[in-house]
Structure formats: structure tokens, C-alpha cells
Image (cartoon, rainbow, N blue to C red):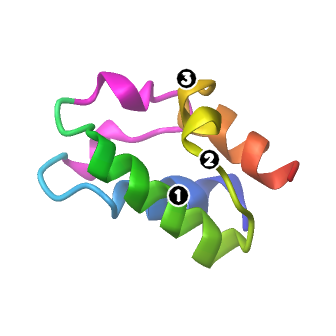
Amino acid sequence: MKLELFVEKFAEQFDDTHVEEFSTGTVFKDLDEWSSLTALSIIAMVDEELEKRITGADIRNSSTIEELYHLAKSK
């Protein structure tokens, strides 16, 4: 999966945040809609789309969508 598609799939996990707010450099934890439930949705999306397992610690240790993408791809 390319980074751009990952950003799209990441954005799909949010109901009320406009897709224009998402880019590779988005600091996702700064989004108003970010929550622990969203984090669980991201973990499930990565598992389904990339067939990689990430943890809550991986999310805590990432700042941007791009950082999380590269971390997930490296597993």
C-alpha cells in the first residue's frame, strides 16, 4: 500500500473530520475527533489493510500519519 492510500484509509476512520485535514504530515493526535476508540479503529485498519500488527504504544510513539505508516510497514 502506498502512503497516499494509507492516508485515505486513515481518514476514513474519522466521521466528522474533513478529508482535507489529512495529509502525510498531519499530527493525528491533535485532531479534535481523536480518541482511544479512533486509535482502536486505526489498529484494526492497519491489521486489515497492511496485514501488520501495531500496538497502542506504536501509536503513542508516532506523531504524524507518515510516521505511523512507516512504523507499520517496518513490522
Q: Is residue 59 left or right of residue 3?
A: left
Residue 63 is tagged as: 3
Look at the numbered discs 2 and 1 and tell me whether their residues touch, using CB distance below 8 Å: yes
Q: CA distance from mark 3 to mark 1?
A: 15 Å
SS class, disc 3: loop
Q: Is residue 73 left or right of residue 9?
A: right
- Residue at x 73% of width, y 74% of height: 51
Q: Residues within 10 Å of mark 2 (few under 14, many from 20)?
A: few
Which mark sits nearer the N-terminus, 2 or 1?
1
Q: Nearer the viewer, mark 3 or mark 2?
A: 2
x%, y% of residue 25?
A: 54, 27
**Quarter of the image where one finds residue 14:** bottom left
Q: Nearer the viewer, mark 2 or mark 1?
A: 2
Residue 55 is tagged as: 2
The residue that mark 1 highlights is: 43
SS class, disc 2: loop
Looking at the figure, which quarter contains the N terminus? bottom right
Q: Residues within 10 Å of mark 1 (few under 14, many from 20)?
A: some
Q: Which residues are magenta?
A: 18-31
Type of the residue with mark 2: Thr
